[in-house]
Amino acid sequence: MSELTVRIAGWGKYLPARVMDNHEIERLVDTSDEWIRARSGIVERRIAADDETTCSMSVASARPALDMAGVDPLDLELIIVATGTPDHPGFPATGSLVQQALGATRAGAFDVGAGCGAFGYGLVAGAQFVLSGAHRNVLVVGADVMSRVIDWRDRSTCVLFGDGAGAVVLQASDTLGGLRSFVLGSDGCGAPRLYIPAGGSRQPASHDSVENGAHYLKMDGRDVYRFATRVIPESILGALVKAGLAPRDLDLLIPHQANSRIIEHARKKLELPPERVFVNVDKYGNTSSASIPVALCEALEQGRIARGDIIGMCAFGAGLCWAAAIWEWN
Ligand code: UT7
């Protein structure tokens, strides 16, 4: 009997139509196109329209993924939405809204919250449901509307983020490959380095919290930068070792798109040539949970992934946390 594996049978992405370039941000805060490009590699980002939400963008990325996989929403057994910007704070899960919008009436649904690392966690979790034999068709979405939690007066954060969504359909398979290994990690000491102070149970919404801007994302950029440059190579190496592989075996590294300097640092540390590392942070900024699935979609659209290729994915962010996965494209 052949071994049960998991494959990515379909993928899709959604980026809001509205493009906001660095020059537009120059008019909001004391910054410059030169600074943003030099320090982050970002040139422009997408901003959700007023009527767009994490749910609506999730659905817009999921539909093409389901079509490609040839999976009817009625055959979906599980929906996982990775997000840090759910439509509602906790109740209900955005996953349930996506389930309803897709008409996936036989699917269970839940959200994964792990900052910008959430899609990595969601992908690994979804794969486990398939590999255990529990489910044959699982939808994993990464979506965030960062523009709604950004303080547009804070130049240290507002230049970095953008909105978007990406989705994959995971399917049971008997072809070799799929998820070869993964590493999940967390260091909660770093929680105050990247967080939204209010709006949760620790500091519920109040007049004061709104007045103090406590519902906006706060970040210690330098600390998170140090963390990110360490954690990408470490977690990818850890996952490669578990799979019995080395960096030279990586055909494509898809790191979380937070900053081109962080990515470049990781590339050098892993001694990978530039063509083996995917970068699109210039076009979309940091789309948090959407960053890896959107990058994966674009890498596939550009023909940069072929059957048998070894793909490394590394998500990281608030927590602080990280999730690295080695995927053999099947
Ligand atoms: O997905 C979540 C993960 N998040 C990240 O991975 C973000 C990680 N951090 C970073 O990407 C970088 O730290 C930043 C891009 C946020 C900042 O780059 P940096 O090279 O670390 O700059 P810095 O924070 O050390 O700031 C350098 C200077 C400061 O001025 P002084 O103190 O040297 O006078 C800042 O006040 O740049 C100033 N600065 C700005 N200047 C123009 C900070 N933000 C801006 C800005 N425009 N937008």
Image: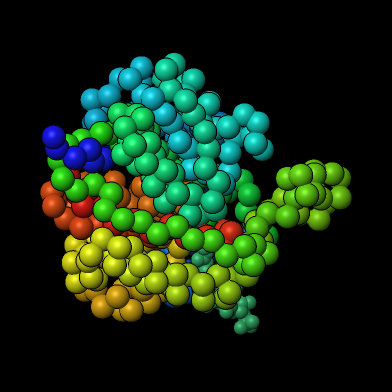
Q: In this image, 214 relative to 252: left or right?
A: right
Residue that sits furthest to the front in the current view: 1
| Residue 165 in picture, x, y percent from top left | 43, 42
| Residue 90 in picture, x, y percent from top left | 65, 36
Q: Nearer the viewer, residue 223 or 138?
A: 138
Give the tally of numbered discs.
0
Residue at left offset 58%, top offset 74%: 223
- Position of the C terminus, as image quadrant, is top left
Q: In this image, 86 relative to 185: left or right?
A: right
| Residue 218 in picture, x, y percent from top left | 66, 61
Q: Quadrant of residue 31?
A: bottom right
Q: Quadrant of residue 12?
A: top left
Q: Quadrant of residue 244?
A: bottom left
| Residue 284 in picture, x, y percent from top left | 42, 54
Res. 319 visible in picture: yes
- Position of the N terminus, as image quadrant, is top left
Q: In this image, 167 relative to 302: left or right?
A: right
Model colouring:
rainbow
329 relative to 169, above or below: below
Q: Dividing the image into four quarters, tell me where ligand 1 lies.
A: bottom right
Res. 34 visible in picture: no
Residue at left offset 42%, top offset 51%: 120
Residue at left offset 37%, top offset 41%: 128
Q: In this image, 167 relative to 162: left or right?
A: left
Residue at left offset 36%, top offset 30%: 134
124 relative to 235, above or below: above
Q: Nearer the viewer, residue 176 or 330?
A: 176
